């Protein structure tokens, strides 16, 4: 079957934008700039009306419960996250036994799963982490264990022998009487205890010091950092370990904790939104190349339709469509251009597993068609959409196995 994509805006590696037609056959791009000479009845034509064609994305997603895994991964593909990497959901899915890893591998065999570093369930001794590798884990996720420096040091020592990539989750301390807010003027005004910016920086410093001692050459990715101070420390550590990468959510480069003045749970993030000073610092870091990945902070979780108190409300999981709008906005505002899309929304190198996220001849036809993002779009326009969980971007499926 032949599908022709008409009037799509393609961005070249040099940042040039051109309106082109694209021919897709058997799941691959086989032609650019022409319409094949075939019987019209055998060709499916889709007019994108000058929508922007961009590569499908890769992201670290909180795992759904196992019974919903197949459906959730299919939904992620449909939304344009073609290469999801599952990380533990701190509340429902742990991934700390070989049985956990093997069960998910059967449900979603082509989706990498990151095992938890913990002493829960089957891994009673951290030396047993090798059993998770044997079960098929693609790497290891450091979550709440970062709160215990002694256990973390032991874990890193054993991880050095396992030789798999490491992901460090958000560095929020769950044991405190806090609710994922930034400690500052806003938290004082609304009477909710938060966490200081310096807390994240200290945890980053501790982790970097331990890693330099116990596993100095292992690829490490910090999933989501919310302060420029911590980001600068990670950037300096790359001189000793080039395998270190770091992500900053585009939300944290646009919004501030001021959005929480009215106790709006739509702005409860992990890590928390910070002050305008930190937000501006993260944005400048993106412009200077200190950010390697723009994570979506998306999770497979049901929407809570019943209102709950602000303290009890779950962390926000923004829709993928809003995420695309935010990425487009921060790239254009930073002067980077949409040609930087593939490098910042594709997985860091240690997690690519051979996947290609570029668009070109004989490449898989996995891409997105987005309405052109105007440089004049305002933060308020984005947040009006976000607050209502709207769909500013509508991916279109052209046939099974291909995403646009």
Image: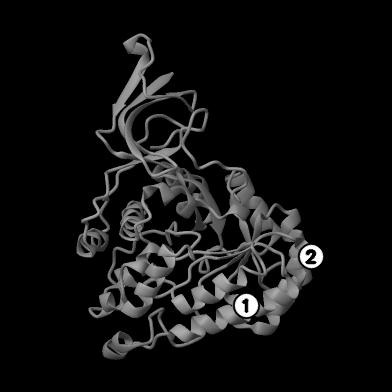
Q: Residues within 10 Å of mark 2 (few under 14, many from 20)?
A: some
Residue 153: percent from left, percent from top: 71, 79
Would residue 27 be found to the left or right of residue 325 on screen?
A: right
The percent position of residue 108, horizontal first and vertical second, equals 57, 45
Q: Quadrant of the N terminus?
A: top left
- Number of numbered discs present? 2
Instruction: Read off the residue under disc 2.
Output: 161
Quadrant of the image occupied by residue 244: bottom right
Measured from the top left, where is residue 378 in percent x and y?
A: 21, 61
> In the drawing, what numbered circle is on residue 94?
none
User: Residue at left 27%, top 70%?
Assistant: 307
Identify residue for label 1. 207
Q: Nearer the viewer, residue 304 or 133?
A: 133
Under circle 1, the secondary element is helix
Q: CA distance from mark 1 to mark 2?
A: 18 Å
Establish if 141 lies above or below 212.
above
- Mark 1 Cα within 10 Å, few/some/many (few <14, many 20+)? some
402 left or right of 122? left
Question: Who's the residue at 39% across and 69% down the image?
Answer: 284
Q: Is residue 311 visible?
A: no
Image position, residue 152 (x, y; %): 67, 78
Q: Work out whether residue 224 or residue 172 is closer to the camera in this orientation and state it.
A: 224
Instruction: Name the residue: 49% across, 23% down.
Output: 26
In the picture, the quarter occupied by the C terminus is top left
Judge whether residue 234 can be spotted in this image: yes
Which one is in front, 229 or 56? Answer: 229
Picture quadrant where residue 113 is located: bottom right
């Amino acid at each position: 079957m032949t599908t022709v994509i008409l009037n799509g805006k393609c961005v070249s590696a040099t940042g040039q934008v051109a309106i082109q037609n694209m021919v897709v056959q058997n799941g691959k791009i086989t032609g650019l700039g022409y319409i094949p000479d075939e019987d019209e009845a055998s060709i499916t034509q889709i007019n994108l009306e000058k929508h922007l064609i961009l590569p499908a994305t890769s992201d670290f997603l909180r795992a759904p419960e196992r019974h919903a895994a197949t459906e959730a991964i299919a939904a992620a593909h449909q939304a344009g996250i073609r290469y999801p990497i599952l990380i533990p959901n701190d509340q429902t899915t742990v991934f700390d036994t070989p049985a956990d890893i093997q069960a998910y591998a059967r449900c979603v065999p082509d989706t990498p799963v990151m095992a938890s570093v913990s002493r829960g369930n089957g891994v009673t001794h951290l030396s047993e982490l090798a059993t998770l590798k044997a079960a098929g884990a693609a790497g290891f996720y450091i979550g709440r264990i970062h709160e215990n420096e002694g256990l973390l040091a032991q874990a890193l020592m054993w991880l050095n022998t396992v030789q798999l990539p490491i992901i460090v989750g958000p560095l929020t301390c769950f044991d405190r009487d806090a609710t994922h807010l930034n400690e500052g003027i806003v938290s004082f005004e609304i009477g909710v205890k938060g966490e200081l910016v310096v807390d994240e920086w200290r945890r980053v410093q501790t982790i970097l010091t331990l890693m330099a001692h116990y596993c100095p050459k292992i690829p490490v990715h910090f999933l989501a950092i919310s302060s420029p101070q911590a980001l600068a420390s990670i950037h300096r550590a790359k001189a000793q370990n080039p395998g270190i990468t770091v992500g900053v959510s585009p939300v944290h480069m646009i919004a501030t904790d001021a959005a929480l003045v009215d106790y709006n749970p739509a702005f409860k993030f992990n890590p928390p939104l910070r002050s305008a000073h930190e937000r501006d610092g993260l944005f400048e870091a993106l412009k200077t190349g200190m950010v390697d990945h723009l994570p979506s902070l998306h999770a497979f979780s049901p929407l809570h339709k019943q209102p709950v108190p602000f303290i009890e409300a779950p962390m926000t999981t923004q829709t993928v469509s809003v995420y695309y709008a935010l990425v487009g906005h921060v790239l254009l505002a930073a002067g980077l251009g949409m040609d930087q899309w593939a490098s910042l929304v594709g997985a860091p190198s240690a997690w690519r597993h051979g996947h290609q996220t570029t668009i070109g001849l004989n490449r898989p036809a996995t891409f997105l068609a987005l309405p052109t993002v105007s440089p004049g779009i305002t933060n308020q326009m984005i947040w009006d959409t976000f607050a209502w969980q709207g769909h500013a971007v509508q991916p279109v499926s052209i046939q099974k196995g291909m995403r646009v």
